[in-house]
Each structure stands twice: as structure tokens, then as C-alpha cells.
Image (cartoon, rainbow, N blue to C red):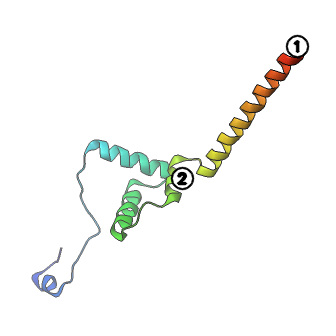
Amino acid sequence: MASNPEQLEAGEHSHSGRLLLRMPKQLHAELAARSDREGVSLNQWIVAALSRAAAGEDEPAASEQRSRGIPRELRVALIVNACVVAIAAAIAVALIIIAWN
């Protein structure tokens, strides 16, 4: 908001950098939880989200990985490993049953 009419006409604006924003309690809780997961203050998280939105950018993938904890590649490797172990266990049980008979 301009501090006087002359500044408004000249296109100069004076912004304090402060904004009072009212939102539903549930949204506030969700945003606070998200900022906690990313290890930043709620204010920092909201400023970053607004900056990305103003620039027309989507949320970066690195931020998504931080919020989920385990990177996608590691999750895939763990799933593949679990499948291999399960198959090896099934073969081992089958061999024990065959050897027992």
C-alpha cells in the first residue's frame, strides 16, 4: 500500500513485508506439520511456497523426498531386495521339504 497519494500515482509502493492471514484451523495444522517435516519454520515454509507460486514453479522433487523421508531409489531397492529374499526363502523351504522326504 502506498504511504501517500503521490507515491500511488508514481507507481511506487511501500510494503512492510508483514501480512495478517486468516485460514481454517485444519489448513494451519497441515501447513505446520509440513514445515516441521521439512525442518523449517512455518513462516519460512509459507514464504518459500508463495515464492514458488509467484514464479509459476511446482514444488521441487527434493522437497518431496525430504517430506517423505526415504528417496524413491532407495525405496525401490528395498522392495526389490525384499522380493529376492522372499523368493530365496521359498526355494530354501522347498529344498528342505524335498530333502526331508
On the image, numbered disc 2 is attached to which residue?
A: 65
Residue 4 seen anywhere in this rendered image of the structure: yes
Residue at point 49%, 53% (across, down): 64
Across and down, in percent, residue 93 comes to: 79, 22
How far apart, in angstroms, are the residues tagged by discs 1 and 2?
A: 48 Å
Q: Nearer the viewer, residue 21 or 101?
A: 101
In the picture, residue 59 is in which quadrant? Answer: bottom left
Q: Is residue 43 left or right of residue 38?
A: left
Q: Nearer the viewer, residue 53 or 15?
A: 53
From the viewer's perspective, is the residue at label 1 or at label 2 nearer?
1
Across and down, in percent, residue 96 comes to: 85, 19
Local packing at callout 2 (Cα closer than 10 Å; few below 14, some 14-19, many 20+) is few
Residue 71 seen anywhere in this rendered image of the structure: no
Q: Label 2 sits on what residue type?
A: Gln
The answer to whether 45 is drawn above or below residue 26 in the figure is: below
On the image, numbered disc 1 is attached to which residue?
A: 100
The answer to whether 100 is drawn above or below residue 91 in the figure is: above
